[in-house]
Each structure stands twice: as C-alpha cells, then as structure tokens.
Image: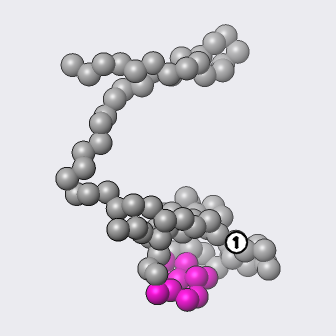
C-alpha cells in the first residue's frame, strides 16, 4: 500500500515530512493542525508550495541491513568514496 507524504518548506523543523490522509482537501489547514506554524505559511505569501510524493509501506517484518560507514576526506576536506566495514 502506498502512503501520501508531504513536506512543506523548512518542514524538518516541525517534524515533517509526514503522511497526509488522502481525504484532506485543505492542505494548509491540515499542516497548521499538525504542527506547522502559520508564520511559515504567511512568509511565503501566494507562493506557498509543498513537496509531496507517494511511498510504499515497509512491511513490519522488514529489518534494515545496518552497516558502519567510514567517511574519509582528502587534504582539502572533500569526502572521498565511502568504504563499507564488514560486520562481525
């Protein structure tokens, strides 16, 4: 099953992205009811847009593979390709 996701501007500050129900007609009202501040909406004026997408539900039996990654940098601070460390 697919979930409808929404992510308003600076949404990470307020717990977004979040799943938004399909039946919602007034997205702005829903955002305000779900923790998004009104001043963020007003700040954008007539140009208030949000990102949205559908994503697949992850089965409850799904267990992600956890690997440790080492970030290496060169002398100028640029990140070099990552190297996977084998789990014991």
Range shown magenta: 23-34
- Residue 43 placement: quadrant: bottom right
Q: Residue at x 60, y 22 (%)?
A: 79
Q: Is residue 59 visible?
A: yes
Is residue 15 placed above or below 65 in the rendered structure? below
Q: Quadrant of the N terminus?
A: bottom left
Q: In the figure, residue 39 lies in which quadrant?
A: bottom right
Q: Is residue 63 left or right of residue 4?
A: left
Closer-to-camera residue (60/10): 60
Q: Is residue 74 left or right of residue 44?
A: left
Is residue 45 covered in magenta?
no
Q: Quadrant of the C terminus?
A: top left
Q: Is residue 33 magenta?
A: yes
Q: Nearer the viewer, residue 29 or 88?
A: 88
Whether 40 is drawn above or below 22: the answer is above
Q: How is the image coloured?
A: one colour
Q: Give the residue drawn at x 79%, y 78%.
A: 45
Neighbor class of circle 1 (other Cα within 10 Å; few <14, some 14-19, many 20+) is few
Where does label 1 land, which residue?
A: 49
Q: Is residue 83 left or right of residue 76?
A: left
- Circle 1 SS class: loop
């Amino acid at each position: 099953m697919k979930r409808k996701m929404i992510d308003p501007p600076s949404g990470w500050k307020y717990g977004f992205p979040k799943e938004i129900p399909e039946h919602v007609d007034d997205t702005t009202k829903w955002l305000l009811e779900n923790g998004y501040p009104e001043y963020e909406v007003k700040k954008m004026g007539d140009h208030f847009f949000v990102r949205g997408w559908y994503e697949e539900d992850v089965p409850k039996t799904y267990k992600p593979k956890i690997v440790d990654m080492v970030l290496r940098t060169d002398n100028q601070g640029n990140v070099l390709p990552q190297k996977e460390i084998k789990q014991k």
